[in-house]
Amino acid sequence: MNVLDTIRKYISDINVALGRLPIDKIAEVVDLLEKARLEGNKVFIFGNGGSAATASHFASDLSKGAISEGKPRIKAFALTDNIPLLTAWANDTSYENVFAEQVENCVDPGDIVIGISGSGSSPNVLKGVKVAKNKGANTIGFIGFDGGKLKSLVDIAIIVPSHNMEQVEDIHLLLEHVITTCLREAL
């Protein structure tokens, strides 16, 4: 396959996956985040690799990009952003605990925890979400592939119907932008 064919196929595959997104579930996430905004609950987001970058980006966009005149601001935090704390937990216990231990410290009942995992099988994301559920948080998963174990663990699972990690990560970023835009403009 030549470069032009590869580009066309990548874009075509993205379009197919976009057309199969669960729009109703995306709207549920918007509604849950709006409720958190109005009730003063916090939002915590985490993932690994490209999903960690999306978590940081999403927390930034919720904290700034979702500002809507006359409404409280959203209190959003990426648990991927405190490198000293993340590496301390990884070094002193195991990498599997890096999000769970932060969730244990920070999450209160009614808060929202968003786990991002392309495969839906990242042990540290699964463990962080389990701790969040035990603490009474609302849980959301941004997932790809077949949803892995994360799909049945979270309250709301948004599964990107693709087995291409780059495309899953592309669409996760698009989802956070759509959600932020809705929180700023549509509500």
Image (spheres, helix red, strand yellow):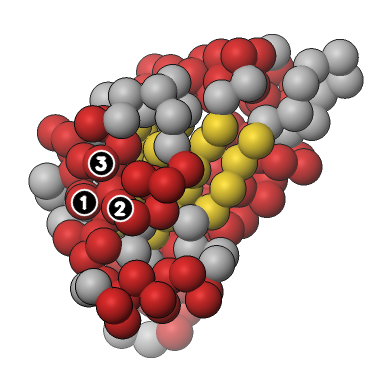
Instruction: Give the numbered dot on residue 127.
Output: 1
Q: For residue 148, say whether it is visible.
A: yes
Horizontal side of 86 relative to 163 (left or right) equals right
Q: Residue at x 31, y 81 (%)?
A: 91
Q: For residue 30, say whether it is visible.
A: no
Q: Residue at x 56, y 65 (%)?
A: 81
Q: Quadrant of residue 110?
A: top left
Amino acid carrying mark 3 in the image:
Val
Amino acid carrying mark 2 in the image:
Ala
Q: Secondary structure at mark 1?
A: helix
Instruction: Give the numbered dot on residue 100.
Output: 2
Separation (CA) of disc 2 from disc 1: 6 Å
Q: Is residue 62 above or below residue 7?
A: above
Label 3: which residue?
131
Of the two numbered discs 2 and 1 on the same chain, state the one appearing first in sequence.
2
Furthest residue in direction bottom, as rendered? 2
